Image (tube, rainbow, N blue to C red):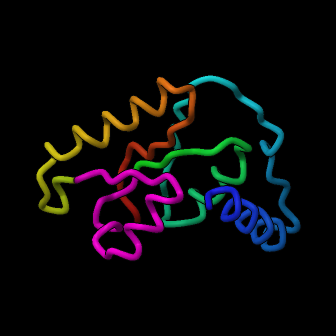
Amino acid sequence: MYKSLRSLICYILERFFRTIKIEGTNREEVGPLLVVSNHPNMMIDSLLVVYSYQRELSFLAKSTLFQNPISNFILRKINLLPVYRKSDGLDTNLNAKTFSEASKILREGQAVLIFPEGRSI
């Protein structure tokens, strides 16, 4: 599901940003990779990171996106992991499972994307 969604994202971005050169699509990193990115808006920065990396990325995303059973299913299928934020009034101890899963992904030589500022405007 991730590869299909990535193809759609690339198609849309290439049409939307016709006059802008987006670099990084030939990256072929191997081994564990932690991608750390700014998150100034809710969507476009995530899409640009997906566009920039050929390999699959697992994302850490705010847990409130996972509340609906349908979105929960879809988000997990495209490699998103919930982060429980104090600002959402949630128990941050629940993050132990998320960070354990992210560590496992890295140990398996895969890639994880985080947005450390952890908020959308």
Q: Does residue 33 show up magenta in the picture? A: no
Q: Is residue 29 toward the left or the right of residue 14 in the image?
A: left
Quadrant of residue 10 within the rendered picture = bottom right
Q: Residue at x 39, y 51 (%)?
A: 81
Q: Position of residue 57 (x, y in %)?
A: 57, 45
Which residue appears at 69% of the width and 56% of the height?
A: 3
Q: Which residue sits at x=19%, y=62%? A: 88
- Image quadrant of residue 119? bottom left
Could you tell me which residue is drawn at 69 percent across and 25 percent down? 30
Q: Which of the two residues, 48 or 71, is positioned nearer the viewer here? A: 71
What span is in magenta? 61-84
Q: Quadrant of the C terminus?
A: bottom left
Q: Does residue 82 appear left or right of residue 14 in this picture? A: left
Count of all numbered marks drawn on residues in the image: 0
Image quarter of the N terminus: bottom right
- Image x and y of residue 58, in percent: 51, 46
Residue 52 % position (x, y): 72, 47
To which quarter of the image does residue 8 belong? bottom right
Left or right of 97? Residue 70 is: right
**Residue 43, percent across and down?**
54, 66
Instruction: Please say if 37 is above or below 61.
Output: above
